[in-house]
């Protein structure tokens, strides 16, 4: 029998010729290390229209990442006659860039005396504008990004009411699906509640966040296997606490 080991970095094929002993174990280990850095700029402004109304806007430029991947693989097999075979691939390396989408944010806040605040944020992100860059053209990959992803409209609404030294908070957020129509549903909704205790010297805040989302999972390529996807419904609950001291 034969084992073939194909290293994608070099396209070399390693072949081990084995006898008729029965395998006891087989292990394949693949490692990938990614390092890099990125830069972006954020600009925002708040306009006090009246004593009870605040208007705001912000622009987050794309983040320009420069990344480096390093990878290697090794495999090991043991047979019932105590023979053992192993192979290690050459190390691979690849440098590339990633540009993430720009974000546009608009906000509005209503001030209710000194007791309450009601605010709303709108965020626009065009995920289809993300791009990969390198000496390799990435034309097929960028074309796929442009066709499979879409622009999103995200909405966040929150309120806070103060009854010194206590504060009560609540919020709702809807994050639009980043996928193009008919591909998948990646939308997400969150509901949050919280309260806090604040004095001149310290504050303590508690929050509960419930998040729900629905997304199709394809175990195999549907154009080949012709199978229906699994509809995954995800729910998560988070309890948060923060403590701060003022000097």
Image (cartoon, helix red, strand yellow):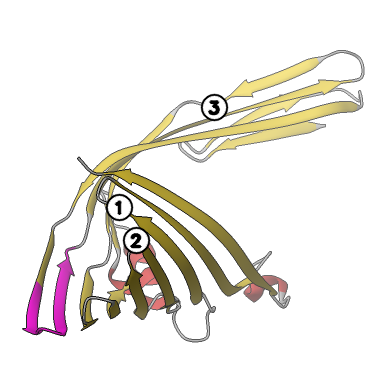
Q: Quadrant of the N terminus?
A: top right
What residue is shown with label 2?
165
- Residue nearest the viewer, comparing 178 with 226: 178
In the displayed structure image, the side of residue 10 where residue 78 appears, left or right: right
Q: Are marks 2 and 1 in contact (CB under 8 Å)?
A: yes
Q: Is residue 26 placed above or below 59 in the rendered structure?
A: above
Q: Residues within 10 Å of mark 2 (few under 14, many from 20)?
A: few
Mark 1: few, some, or many residues within 10 Å (few <14, many ≥20)? Answer: few
Q: Which residue is mark 1?
A: 199
Q: Secondary structure at mark 2?
A: loop
Residue 187 located left or right of residue 158: right
Quote the CA–CA distance across marks 3 and 1. Answer: 61 Å
- Magenta: predominant secondary structure element? strand
Name the residue carrying label 3.
89
Residue drawn at the location 44% of the way across and 81% of the way down: 180
| Residue 164 seen in render | yes
Where are the magenta residues, as a range? 46-61
* Quarter residue 174 falls in: bottom left
**Quarter occupied by residue 116:** bottom left
């Amino acid at each position: 029998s034969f084992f073939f080991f194909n290293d994608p970095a070099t396209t070399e094929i390693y072949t081990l010729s084995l006898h008729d002993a029965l395998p006891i174990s087989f292990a394949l280990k693949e490692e990938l290390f990614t390092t890099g850095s990125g830069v972006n700029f954020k600009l925002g402004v708040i306009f006090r229209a009246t004593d009870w109304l605040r208007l705001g806007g912000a622009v987050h430029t794309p983040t320009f990442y420069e990344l480096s991947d390093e990878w290697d693989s090794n495999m090991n097999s043991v047979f019932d006659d105590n023979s053992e075979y192993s192979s290690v691939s050459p190390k691979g390396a690849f440098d590339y860039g990633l540009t993430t989408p720009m974000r546009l944010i608009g906000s509005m806040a209503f001030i209710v005396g000194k007791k309450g605040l009601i605010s709303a944020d709108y965020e626009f992100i065009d995920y289809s504008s993300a791009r990969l860059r390198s000496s390799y053209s990435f034309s097929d990959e960028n074309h796929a990004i442009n066709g499979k992803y879409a622009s999103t409209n995200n909405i966040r609404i929150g309120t806070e009411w103060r009854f010194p030294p206590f504060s009560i908070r609540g919020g709702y957020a809807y994050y639009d699906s980043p996928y193009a129509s008919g591909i998948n549903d990646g939308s997400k909704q969150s509901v949050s509640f919280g309260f806090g205790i604040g004095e001149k010297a310290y504050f303590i805040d508690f929050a509960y966040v419930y998040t729900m989302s629905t997304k199709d999972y394809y175990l195999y390529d549907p154009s080949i296997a012709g199978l229906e996807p699994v509809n995954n419904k995800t729910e998560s609950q988070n309890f948060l606490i923060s403590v701060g001291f003022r000097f």
